[in-house]
Image (tube, rainbow, N blue to C red):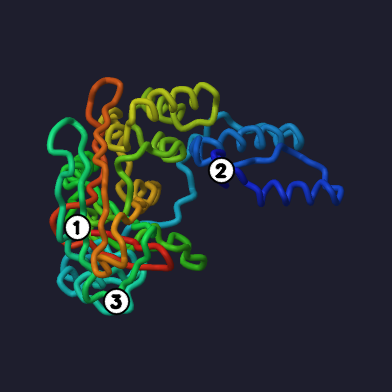
Amino acid sequence: MGNSMYTYYNACGKLIDRILRKHGAKRFYRLGLGDELSGMEYTFLDWQTGLVNQLMDYFSLNVAERPNQLPSSRLYRSVPVERHFWKKTKYFSGEPRFIGSYSNQVPPFTADNPFLAPVQVNRELHKSGTRSCRHIELDLRGSGLRYETGDHVAVLPWNSEALVNRIGMLLNIDLDHPISLLAVDSLNPCQQPFPSPCTYRTAFTHYVDITGPPRMNTLRVASHYAKDTKESDRLYLLGSSSPTGKEIYSQWILEQRRSIIDILEEFTSLAIPADVLLERLPRLKPRLYSISSSAQVYPDTVHLACAVVREYTPAGNPVLGFSLFNDRSMTVTTSPHQIAITH
């Protein structure tokens, strides 16, 4: 895996491939190079399609064009917390790992135990015009955290309340209902996709990405939950690795900047359970910013210059993204030459 813009793109994989060939290994199928620039899933599915066809030819196999049954690859199931346990149960409220770490600040502060840093300044740098850039100052006093000039800050975004309310309405769920995630196979549990127990609102606000393009695999799974046959077929095509499917996905999803919310609104017969969606949606990832302040001049304050990007679809509709900064506390943690910040 790598980025084709880099000089040493997938250098390790290419090295292993050369060593195998040097020692007499025979190539069965072309080397696959994951390219983040083109989309990792998109690149992998293109490689996987050819591999599957090669395997089918080699072993003389016939596979149905489309399975009729629901996929059986569920790793988790959500279990509602019984109402009489609500007040007795502690819930995650956005913490990355330790429950209650936002309300009970105890050092040492790490990526798993962030420090709540007050936002001292949040002001606009451009007084006029259409461009927007915010000057942000975060207070590190009392944290014991230190940074060096040139370090980066990782900001953990959250989804806006309006978008979370919208997806809750589309899924027909009570967003404030608490749930726990349990492994389907109790003998072989996997790492949870996000911390639980928590409410649906917390999960959709802090833990999963509801604004980015839905993965092709997610669309294939969703096709089994569409009650209308035409909508089911269309969803499956969007998530397929066929040339037609990939072309439609690129044009209708990527170019039009559609999210999972757009999918739920477009396909009105789609009744995918919320826990299935939560398992399939990617985690919210930090956004990196360069620190613009000098540690020698401002040892207890981190300064950021953050451009505000306003994007529109080809149809002229605004693209709704994450929330990053506002005039409240942000959580801060540090590792060597990197500071991670969440709200």
Residue identified by numbered label 2? 6
Look at 40% across and 47% down and name the residue there: 280
For the residues labelled 1 and 3, say whether their Cβ atoms are less than 8 Å apart.
no
Residue identified by numbered label 3? 144
Residue 256 falls in image quadrant: top left
Q: Amino acid at mark 2?
A: Tyr
Q: Secondary structure at mark 2?
A: loop
Kindly identify which numbered label has been placed on residue 342.
Answer: none
Residue 314 shows in the view: yes
Look at 70% across and 34% down and name the residue there: 56
Dot placed on the residue nearer the N-terminal end, 2 or 1: 2
From the top left corner, tell me how far across and down residue 78 is, in percent: 33, 57
Residue identified by numbered label 1? 177
Dot placed on the residue nearer the N-terminal end, 1 or 3: 3
Please name which of the two marks, 1 or 3, marks the residue nearer to the observer. Answer: 3
Residue 153 falls in image quadrant: bottom left
From the top left corner, tell me how far across and down residue 146 is, in percent: 33, 71
Toward the viewer: 8 or 65?
8
Q: Amino acid at mark 1?
A: His
Q: CA distance from mark 1 to mark 3?
A: 37 Å
The residue carrying pointer 2 sits among few (fewer than 14), some (14 to 19) or many (20 or more) residues within 10 Å by Cα, namely few
Residue 136 falls in image quadrant: bottom left
Dot placed on the residue nearer the N-terminal end, 3 or 2: 2
Q: Seen from this angle, which residue lies furthest front?
A: 297
Q: Amino acid at mark 3?
A: Gly
Q: Is residue 85 above or below residue 252?
A: below
Q: Secondary structure at mark 1?
A: loop
